[in-house]
Amino acid sequence: MLCGGSDLNNGRRFLAMLLLLISLTAYGAEMNNLGDYQWKSRLILIQSASETEGAVESLRDAHAELDDRDIIWFVNTGAGLVSNQARVSGGVEHDVNELFAKVRSEDRVLLIGKDGGIKSREPSLDLEAIFRRTDAMPMRIREMRTD
């Protein structure tokens, strides 16, 4: 076996679990799990830590840019989930917690595309980098052409 095979297997298991979460679909207006956002919204998931201090305020200040890119955000503060959604279901909170339990501890900020794939993993929140990365995505480029 090649060196790092265990990491590859762990990555595959993680991806399979993520795809399972994303593939779950609930019918109705309420978003009951992360999979309900697939093909509708991009997601920013943040695990609160000293590296992500001030994230909620930064995200709230950038609401116009986030809305333009169809980005929904969730910040796990340790005391609960904060979001730009009016209500966060227990299923979404469970999915976010489970996802952060599966990634490396230094991966505090996750960007998930509309297709459900993780597009970036970062130790801290850099909204400008997230906007650049999002704007370079093929689906986003098509969206900007039609707007």
Image (cartoon, rainbow, N blue to C red):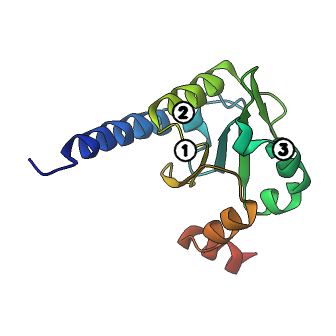
The numbered mark at residue 54 is 3
| Pointers 3 and 1 in contact (C-beta within 8 Å) | no
From mark 2 to mark 3, how far is it between C-alphas? 19 Å
The quarter of the displayed image where residue 114 is located: bottom right
From mark 3 to mark 1, how far is it between C-alphas? 17 Å
Residue 141 position, x and y percent, is 62, 76
Work out whether 20 lies above or below 123.
above
The residue that disc 2 covers is 100
- The quadrant in which the C terminus is found is bottom right
User: Between residues 147 and 34, which one lies in front from this camera angle?
Assistant: 34
The quarter of the displayed image where residue 7 is located: top left
Identified at 19% across, 46% down, the residue is 5
Choose the circle earlier in sequence order: 3 or 1.
3
Q: Which amino acid type is shown beneath numbered disc 2?
A: Phe
Q: Which amino acid type is shown beneath numbered disc 3?
A: Gly
Work out whether 79 lies above or below 106.
above
The residue that disc 1 covers is 107
Identified at 82% across, 63% down, the residue is 65
Q: Is residue 7 left or right of residue 65?
A: left
Q: Alpha-carbon neighbours of circle 2 within 10 Å: few (<14), some, or many (≥20)? A: some
Identified at 17% across, 50% down, the residue is 3
Choose the circle earlier in sequence order: 2 or 3.
3
